[in-house]
């Protein structure tokens, strides 16, 4: 069974930085897209950033220039470096990935989320 586990969330002041990690574990043959989504209270979940196995990247307009997504394929891990954080970045951040596991078929997996709170 494949699992995605996020870490690195917490409370930070406006203008501060956090680095989120998403580690995939289990029987993994390959991972294609990895992405970060977020959901603020009372709002729909939205895509923050995604990265393909080839390194192509997409960012939401709201985070361009402030957030950087990256991945370490050898560690099956994705990262989200978040700088210049704003109160409106407060949300639960979820990792999502397309993973080929024991059945050699790609399936969509989600982590349980990590809370990011930006407040003074």
Image (tube, rainbow, N blue to C red):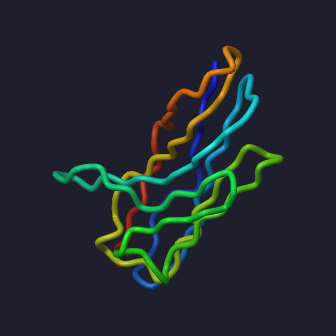
**Quarter that holds the N terminus:** top right
Residue drawn at (22%, 50%) of the image? 44
Residue 9 position in % (x across, y down): 51, 57
Residue drawn at (52%, 79%) of the image? 83
Q: Is residue 82 above or below residue 91?
A: below
Q: Is residue 18 above or below residue 71?
A: below
Residue drawn at (34%, 64%) of the image? 90
Residue 57 position in % (x across, y down): 56, 65
The residue lying toward the viewer, choosing from 17 and 52, is 52
Q: Is residue 11 left or right of residue 52?
A: left
- Residue extending furthest left? 42
- Residue extending furthest right? 74
Q: How many marks?
A: 0
Asked where in the image residue 13 lies, by quadrant, the reply is bottom left
Residue 16 position in % (x across, y down): 50, 80
Residue 38 position in % (x across, y down): 37, 54
**Quarter that holds the C terminus:** bottom left
The residue lying toward the viewer, choosing from 106 and 93, is 106
- Residue extending furthest top? 103
The residue lying toward the viewer, choosing from 80 and 29, is 29
Q: Is residue 31 above or below residue 55?
A: above
Residue drawn at (45%, 68%) of the image? 59
């Amino acid at each position: 069974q494949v699992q995605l586990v996020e870490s690195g969330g917490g409370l930070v002041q406006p203008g501060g930085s956090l680095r989120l990690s998403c580690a995939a574990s289990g029987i993994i043959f390959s991972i294609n897209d990895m992405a970060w989504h977020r959901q603020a209270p009372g709002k729909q979940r939205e895509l923050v950033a995604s990265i393909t196995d080839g390194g192509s990247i997409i960012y939401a307009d709201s985070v361009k220039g402030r957030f950087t997504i990256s991945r370490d394929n050898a560690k099956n891990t994705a990262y989200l470096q978040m700088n210049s954080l704003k109160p409106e970045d407060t949300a639960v951040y979820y990792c999502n990935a397309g993973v080929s596991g024991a059945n050699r078929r790609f399936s969509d997996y989600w982590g349980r989320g990590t809370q990011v709170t930006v407040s003074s």
